Amino acid sequence: MHVGSISTAMDLDEIQELIGGSARAYEEELWRVNKHIHENPEPHYEETQAHDTICDLLENSGYDVTRHAYGLSTAFQAEFGKGGGLVSYNAEYDALPCESEGYHHACGHNHIATSSIAAFLFTADMLKRTEIKGRVRLLGTPAEESGGEKIDLIEAGAYRGVDASLMAHPYSNIECGDGEAHAAAAPWEGINALDAVVAAYNNISMLRQQLPLTQRVHGIISNGGERPNVIPGLTTMELYARAATDADLEILCKRLESCILAGAQASGCQVECSWDRAYKNLQNSETIAEVFTKSMKIIGRDFKSKSDENMGGSTDQGWSPFNEIYQQVNMADLFSGNVTHQIPGIHPLFLIPTPEGREPHTPRFATAAGTYGSFLCALDTGKGLAAAGYQLLADPDLRQKAWSEHLKK
């Protein structure tokens, strides 16, 4: 794409007008990529088609791409510009398991990828048009669902030297026991691990009534036994625990372990609890959030800067809760993320048109995430991310303000 050079300072209206031109130029290709990712959902660590499709688009657009970046087979990196500051956008593209079979994009990661790819392309175009020094990076970040690969990317140095990390997320309008016995012939000879895990689950369900709004617990019994006529000797429950801070999460996990232990003791079982890697609370940059909000208002999106509404979810970047209508975004200061503990960043929610029963991680949301209307929401969000990213690159004082705010947290 060829663009002319502009040396004079621009106001936000001019920036969005130029970004709008880039959006029109790339819209068809971005829709093709969005649609391909949605129609070919892949689980975490296996996003090979998404990886290749995005890398092909970037290379065909004239950018150098590092495929399989940082030792991760489905990660990638593209970068453009010289000197100055460095702004990075995160593209997620892994899918969730479907209740019936296979996988689907019930969390709308095809739109996360699209908005971040768009933001990278639009920001790069702005750098081509102007004489400012600055660099923009697009990171392909696989395995957000149950993988937390941004944590590995942090450790591998993917965010070293980055001044700000931006991304956005679509939303809607919102092991136990041992020993088997035959269940009919000699049930008294067995210890029923299913009883233990059911009791533990019920205990946790009662605990959830007493949890504050900033904490959530979700769980499934992933192994309840092998067959009905054998008393289960081994069962497994998987839990996700979420809290606003690391300290709160540690306390919550101890309370959950007490619930599980009580179920085991009541049924005579032994129990082992282990916790996987934690997603830290989001340290949302108020400075960047304000710039992003102003950028989106130019194209007709309304925002709130903070919220104490219900928590929405967790990720290895960060998450914002919401309680707004279609085409609104809601920013927050808390909730889950690891990247924003390293560098200033934001993770707003943008809403897509969805039917009733539309919450993420549901089949209806997966269907809604495949529509052209929801794609346009992602495209507009890419414009807002690009405008915010470009302003950060163009204004060293703004970057310094974001860092000063970040270092105080």
Image (cartoon, rainbow, N blue to C red):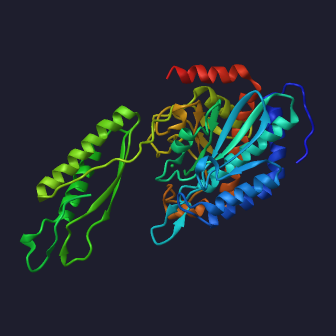
User: Which residue lies most toward the front here?
Assistant: 71
The residue depicted at 19 percent of the width and 57 percent of the height is 199
Whether residue 341 is visible, yes or no, is yes
* Image position, residue 75 (x, y; %): 62, 51
| Quadrant hosting residue 343 | top right
Toward the viewer: 297 or 398?
398
Above or below: residue 126 compared with residue 148: above
Above or below: residue 291 compared with residue 261: above
* Image position, residue 197 (x, y; %): 23, 59
The answer to whether residue 65 is left or right of residue 126 is left
* Image position, residue 108 (x, y; %): 58, 55
Toward the viewer: 220 or 79?
79
| Quadrant hosting residue 150 | top right
Above or below: residue 36 compared with residue 310: below
The residue depicted at 62 percent of the width and 42 percent of the height is 167
The answer to whether residue 195 is left or right of residue 287 is left
The answer to whether residue 231 is left or right of residue 403 is left
